[in-house]
Image: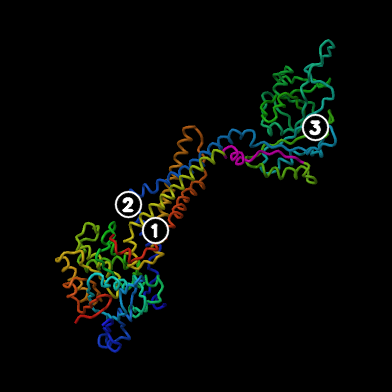
Amino acid sequence: MAKINVRLGSRGDQFRARDLFREAAAGIDARPGRLFLTILGTVLGIASVVVTVGLAQTASGQIARQFDAVAVTQAMAEPGTTRSGWGPAQPVAAIPWDSDIRAGRIAGVEAAGLFASVSLQGEVITALPVNDPSQPMPASPPLFAASAGLLDAVRGYTTAGRFFDAGHDARADRVVVLGARAAERLGVSRVERQPSIFIGDRSYTVIGIIDGMQRRTDLIDGVIVPMGTARANFGLQAPEQVHMRIAVGAGPVIAEQVPIALLPNAPDNVRVQVPVLGSTMRDNIQADINVIFLALGAVALLVGGLGIANVTLLSVMERVGEIGLRRALGARRRDIGAQFMLESVAVGLLGGLIGAALGVAVVVVASAAQAWTPILDTVVVLASALGGGVIGLVAGVYPALKAASVEPITALRGGL
Amino acid sequence: MTVLDLFPPEAPAEFVPEPAIRPAVVELRQVARVFPGDPPVHALRPSNLVVADGDYLSIVGPSGSGKSTLLNLLGLLDRPTSGEYLLDGVPTGQASEAQRSALRGGRIGFVFQQFHLLPHRSVLENVLLATTYSGVPRKERRQRALAALDRVHLSHRLHFLPTLLSGGERQRVAIARAVVTAPQVLLADEPTGNLDTTTSDGVMDLFDELHRDGLTLIVITHDLSVSGRAERRVRITDGNLSEID
């Protein structure tokens, strides 16, 4: 049958995409009122999906923001512990003295500092070493050791004076920084005059008072000496913990890299606490609400798809005469099928676009009413709009097959 | 006589001087159409028919005589049960559905009793519709549609909707749509069936003009005044074809 093709020549200008789009557009355009009702189901379905996802993301954005200051950007590393027989857990390894510097080099770590609690070995911290046998032994505030970076790493701040620096640490200076409550207990409120406190019978100069530290509130009650001082004067063997302030989302990387940085020979012996990823948290909080609304959205989409299928099928029945005419004018079955398919997809896509726009508007308005920042994944919005097209595609299959199977003879017997 | 050989094998030479260059536009060889049933309906008994280029043929017969069956076969809307139909020298019996569609679009123009115009599309768009399926080069489409509408004297109605036109005008739009693709043959099925006498005459005058311009016409009708305009007349009775002299 090559002869036919040769004789007809220009296949290039036969019914192709451009004509197809024109014909489909004209078919949709013919009945605007019906078009509105047809797309309504899809619009509502897509809109409800977008609203559900959008409000879920917005709400979890709110939750994540509340946790930002503390949970999401704090991390801590310490040696792993083991329980041998009975007794308290023993660390299985000692982390090096420069752990804070090592951890600080890792991308995502914004500040790092060492921490250790120091045994007083029966001595008492007092403002004045008064030995009064008639009085009961006063309870001592706990003693901690810290490196210069710790204050920043645990988000503390000085309310008076200053925190110590690497110099104090290296020289093992006899200086202390007081937690705010410990300072109150010891009667120290100003540091300009360089007040002293006594640990046992040795005096230490108070250089600052600190507060804040939401993740280590015990520091507020404690007296803090530089690491070097704790090593020299109290026999501290090793730092206990490295506290880190990290960038949002850096948790997984840090969990992987910090152990290697601290103990390259035995990274398994380092235990790292990193924040739970935001998305995981979000999922946990919103999962059940989402399921309900997404189910509703799915039902709406199903109804919307059925609506499109129904109306397209109806339109095929109505336009049997037109189909017959097109076949008589040389349209192939696939041309007819493609036309109705495209009409259905276009209607679905239109519904998807309107629905997605409507959904975005609802999310924005609802967020504005709650004074929230609307958060909506662009991908979700675009995918929803395209989802409308997919619904149209699925809904159009049966009507399109029906249209393609119309016999021109039967069709032409009826009118247009 | 159940079978009438309108053109015996040696005859075509008289009607078509150069058959090798210009084959008959329509050639039916022992074509029959039987609708299965109990008993089977012989809508068209094995018949031969040759329509040469430029012929003006009318097919007359009472309703139920097989006119529609013949039109459907000639228009490639239906396949014969037996025999071979050559359209413009191309055998169509074994052609695929897509190839038959292409032949319909490219070589046959249809005019129906019911006009079959799309109600929501303008006159011009209705005519353009035929060009989209038949492989008319895109650049020529509009120009050819305008020429076709000019030929049926409807240049002043280009942007009207068919619903606003009279019956005669609608049928002229349908004729413009049928000729815009420059088909080898125009098949008209009761073209005046829905028209009054005056407008019928207008349409038939148009057919005469088209015929003078060299178009091959096959008009199916039960109206003797319409069939009387044709050069050749074929009667169909109970599925049998016979030429009226």
State which chain disc 3 sits on.
Answer: A
Viewer-side residue, A83 vs B159: A83
Q: What are the residue bounds of the magenta stretch?
A: A270-287
Kindly identify which residue carries mark 1: A340
Viewer-side residue, A255 vs A112: A255
- Using the image, tell me which numbered label, if any, was put on residue B92: none
Kindly identify which residue carries mark 2: A31
Residue A332 spot, x, y in % from top left: 39, 67
Dot 1: what SS? helix
- Going by the image, does B171 lie left or right of A315? left
Crowding near the residue tagged with mark 3, few <14, some 14–19, many ≥20 C-alpha atoms within 10 Å: many
Looking at the rendered image, the disc whose residue lies closer to the viewer, 3 or 1, is 1
Q: Earlier in the sequence, mark 3 or mark 1?
A: 3
Q: Which residue lies most toward the bottom here?
A: B10
Crowding near the residue tagged with mark 2, few <14, some 14–19, many ≥20 C-alpha atoms within 10 Å: few
Kindly identify which residue carries mark 3: A228
Up-down relation of residue A334 to residue B46 (above or below): above
Total marks placed:
3
Q: Which residue lies most toward the top here?
A: A134
